[in-house]
Amino acid sequence: MPSKSGPAKVWSEEERSAMKAGARERKAASGRSLADERAAGLKDLQDAIAKMPPDDRAMAERIHQVVSAAVPALTPKTYYGMPAYATEGKNGKVICFFKPKSKFKVRYSTFEFQADANLDDGPFWPVSFAVTELTTDVEARIQALVKQAVR
């Protein structure tokens, strides 16, 4: 119930901003051809990365290189304002995305997978991975997971 001073704050500013970004992304993509969608998605992804603080930007740029090399067929785009990669096609599904720590002011970034990623491993498996440093081992693990996710 709202107080006399107004409704209770349900969403943080960061969450509201992410929801607005998601709505803009869906609206912008609605009239694009597949080639235009890929080009616009890459530009949106690069613009989102450029706006990040330096440490998040460096990690996002490297993750973009790793994911693009792992599965070049994935379409780069943004997902609620975050760098993401989707299956090809008009109704392409986001498979994975990078959530920079600055997005929600938390202590570490994450690399996450959506429900359409083929990571199933019995009745229980991880879909979100904390990333504090991109070592060669971490990059190799991301590459392997992305490849598995789209098989």
Image (cartoon, grey):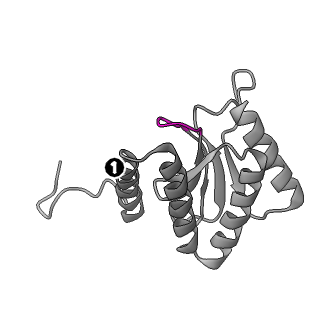
From the viewer's perspective, tell me whether residue 129 is left or right of residue 32.
right
10 Å crowding of disc 1: few (<14), some (14-19), many (20+): few
Residue at the spot x=37%, y=53% of the render? 28
Q: Is residue 10 above or below residue 86?
A: below
Provide residue 2's location: percent of width, then percent of height. Answer: 16, 53
Q: Which image quadrant is residue 66 in?
A: bottom right
State the residue in front, 33 or 102: 33
Question: Which residue of the protein is positioned furthest toward the left in this rendering?
Answer: 4
90 sits to left or right of 141: left
Q: Secondary structure at mark 1?
A: helix
Predominant SS along the magenta part: loop
Residue 80 lies, in percent from the top left, at 46, 54
* Place of residue 7 in the rendered image (x, y in percent of width and height, measured from the top left): 19, 56
Let me know if residue 98 is in the magenta part.
Answer: no
Query: In percent of the image, x 63 and y 65: which residue is there?
Result: 107
Q: Is residue 123 above or below residue 144?
A: above
Q: Relative to the observer, which residue lies in front, 86 or 142?
A: 86
Marker count (numbered): 1
Where does label 1 land, which residue? 27
Question: Is residue 66 something one can see in this rendering?
Answer: yes
Name the residue rendered at 70%, 54% in the picture.
130
**Which residue range is magenta in the image?**
87-93
Find residue 59 and report its image quarter.
bottom right
Quick check: can you spot residue 105? no
Quadrant containing the C terminus is top right
Indicate the position of residue 3 as horizontal and vertical percent values. 15, 57
Question: Mark 1 is on which residue type?
Answer: Lys
Is residue 17 positioned above or below 114 on the image?
A: below
